[in-house]
Image (cartoon, rainbow, N blue to C red):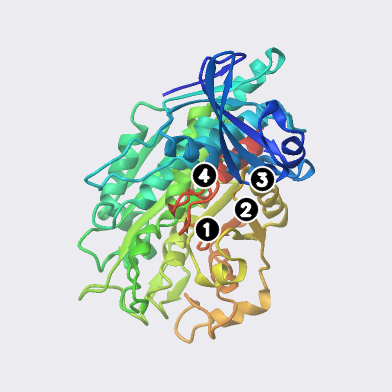
């Protein structure tokens, strides 16, 4: 792959990102109309100049005053796929003249092109070429240095997101708790990231009893995957926790949907955390990061976790399992307690936790609960990087819905309403004192059924760029 910043390019295929105003002005002498600047609309032109034939792919950004980073990513995703449909693998992208800083624009171009042309075809017998072999981003001389840095950052962020997509797209018979652990170990071999994997007696010694309970119904035992990146151990420790249910059948409280094959993506939170650590590491950020991935399969069997079962956690809290399909919070509780014992000052957990959150916010936005300052920061970052989150309330009155007659609390609230809030309130009970905490419920945007912009049908890799940027900003 040859991707670089240039001031001139010999490539005959040019990608032009157009605002509506630029299209109306017939930019570059092309036969454009105002509609060609409509958001994500595409147009392909052959132009002959001085005896040389060139192809132009124009993609609309919309009105100039409404163009931001997300519009550039989306347009580049569309442009990349348009080029490949035309059989073109080498393109020159002309840096658009926009109010954004050139480095930010260059980063968005790289992210959009890589993510928009992503394909997961590992298990198809007939594969097609789907990668752009060469990309020249054409800039002016004074922009060259800044754009080179931004372009490199974009490629790194996209690589981490593609890693998360690959992991979440894996079929359930190929990605088990142990094979997920192996994949993480292999990925970070030879990098500054230290990986430790715990299973069997280790889990009992570490008192990870929620993880043990959830995973005991499967022939593939649970694992706790721990990643450490400490380029600056003097900085306050930031903990990222990702739910790693490699398949969730609901357990004894079996899911009733006709097709639950997408429950292989119930580890999309884990994938986001792993991808974020990759980005942080490859960028060489000065940071102190702990990532915890409790990984398990939730399956019904003679040895499976039972409704009514009571779990005693490391801090002495007892939990009655009212529904085995509310298993994600049981394993996250272990990780929250462990992060506290490891000395984390900030903890962010991310999980495909509740359908209730998806019902509230749809499939493009995740809910975020927790400390007001931290959730506000996550919302601001999400708007910039495209992993959008919306702050949700922690309604203390709802804590009564988690009361149990037999234990300190139940793992699911009573009644059909407020499920995302009661799930977050359950997790809050396990957050160590004095820790700044946020919980991201990403059940909605974990995947997409349609290819549009830089989102490709399947796992989205949501959360990677959000968490990596958070680490960067908190570590500055």
For image coordinates 43% across by 51% down, the residue present is: 270
Q: CA distance from mark 1 to mark 4?
A: 12 Å
The dot on residue 464 is: 4
Other residues around mark 3 within 10 Å, as few (<14) / some (14–19) / many (≥20): many
Q: Nearer the viewer, residue 389 or 91?
A: 91
Given this view, does label 3 or label 2 mark the residue nearer the observer? 2
Looking at the rendered image, the quarter that the C terminus falls into is top right
Disc 2 is placed on an element classified as loop
Other residues around mark 2 within 10 Å, as few (<14) / some (14–19) / many (≥20): many
Discs 1, 2 touching: Cβ within 8 Å:
yes
Discs 3, 1 touching: Cβ within 8 Å:
no
Going from N to C along the chain, the mark reached first, 3 or 1, is 3
Going from N to C along the chain, the mark reached first, 3 or 2, is 3
Picture quadrant where residue 334 is located: bottom left
Residue 363 visible at all: yes
Q: CA distance from mark 3 to mark 2?
A: 8 Å
Q: Which residue is mark 2?
A: 388
For image coordinates 68% across by 57% down, the residue present is: 371
Other residues around mark 1 within 10 Å, as few (<14) / some (14–19) / many (≥20): many
Residue 85 as seen in the image, left or right of residue 373: left
For image coordinates 36% across by 47% down, the residue present is: 167
Q: CA distance from mark 2 to mark 4?
A: 12 Å
Q: CA distance from mark 1 to mark 2?
A: 9 Å
Disc 3 is placed on an element classified as helix
Looking at the rendered image, the quarter that the N terminus falls into is top left
Count of numbered marks: 4
Residue 236 visible at all: no
Q: Which residue is mark 3?
A: 381
Going from N to C along the chain, the mark reached first, 4 or 3, is 3
Disc 4 is placed on an element classified as helix
């Amino acid at each position: 792959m040859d991707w670089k910043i240039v001031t001139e390019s010999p490539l005959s295929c040019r990608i032009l990102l157009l605002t509506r105003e630029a299209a109306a002005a017939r930019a570059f002498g092309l036969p454009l109309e105002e509609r060609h600047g409509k958001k994500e609309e595409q147009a392909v032109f052959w132009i002959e100049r001085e005896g040389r034939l060139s192809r132009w792919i124009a993609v609309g950004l919309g009105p100039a005053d409404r163009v931001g980073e997300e519009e550039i990513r989306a347009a580049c995703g569309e442009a990349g796929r348009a080029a490949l449909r035309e059989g073109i693998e080498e393109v020159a992208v002309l840096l658009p003249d926009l109010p954004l800083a050139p480095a930010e624009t260059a980063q968005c171009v790289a992210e959009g092109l890589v993510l928009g042309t992503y394909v997961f075809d590992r298990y198809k017998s007939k594969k097609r070429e789907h990668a752009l072999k060469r990309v020249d981003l054409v800039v002016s001389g004074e922009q060259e240095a800044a754009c080179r840095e931004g372009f490199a950052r974009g490629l790194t962020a996209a690589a981490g997101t593609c890693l998360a997509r690959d992991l979440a797209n894996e079929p359930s018979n190929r990605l088990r708790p142990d094979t997920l652990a192996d994949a993480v170990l292999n990925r970070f071999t030879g990098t500054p990231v230290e990986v430790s994997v715990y299973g069997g007696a280790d889990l009992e010694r570490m008192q990870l009893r929620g993880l043990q309970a959830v995973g005991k119904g499967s022939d593939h035992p649970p694992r706790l995957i721990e990643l450490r990146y400490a380029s600056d151990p003097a900085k306050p420790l930031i903990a990222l926790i990702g739910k790693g249910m490699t398949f969730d059948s609901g357990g004894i409280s079996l899911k009733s949907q006709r097709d639950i094959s997408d429950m292989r993506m119930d580890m999309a939170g884990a994938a986001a955390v792993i991808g974020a650590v990759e980005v942080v590491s490859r960028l060489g950020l000065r940071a102190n990061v702990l990532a915890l991935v409790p990984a398990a399969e939730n399956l019904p069997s003679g040895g499976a976790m039972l409704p009514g079962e009571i779990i005693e956690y490391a801090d002495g809290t007892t939990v009655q399992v009212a529904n085995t399909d509310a298993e994600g919070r049981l394993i996250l509780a272990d990780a929250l307690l462990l992060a506290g014992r490891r000395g984390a000052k900030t903890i962010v957990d991310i999980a495909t936790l509740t359908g209730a959150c998806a019902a509230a916010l749809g499939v493009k936005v995740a809910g975020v609960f927790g400390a007001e300052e931290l959730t506000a920061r996550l919302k601001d970052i999400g708007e910039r990087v495209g992993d959008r989150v919306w702050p949700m309330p922690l309604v203390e009155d709802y804590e009564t819905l988690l009361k149990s007659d037999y234990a300190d609390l139940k793992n699911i609230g009573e009644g059909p309403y407020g499920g995302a809030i009661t799930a977050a309130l359950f997790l809050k009970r396990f957050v160590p004192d004095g820790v700044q905490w946020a919980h991201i419920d990403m059940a909605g945007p974990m995947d997409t059924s349609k290819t549009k912009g830089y989102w490709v049908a399947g796992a989205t890799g949501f959360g990677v760029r959000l968490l990596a940027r958070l680490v960067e900003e908190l570590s500055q």
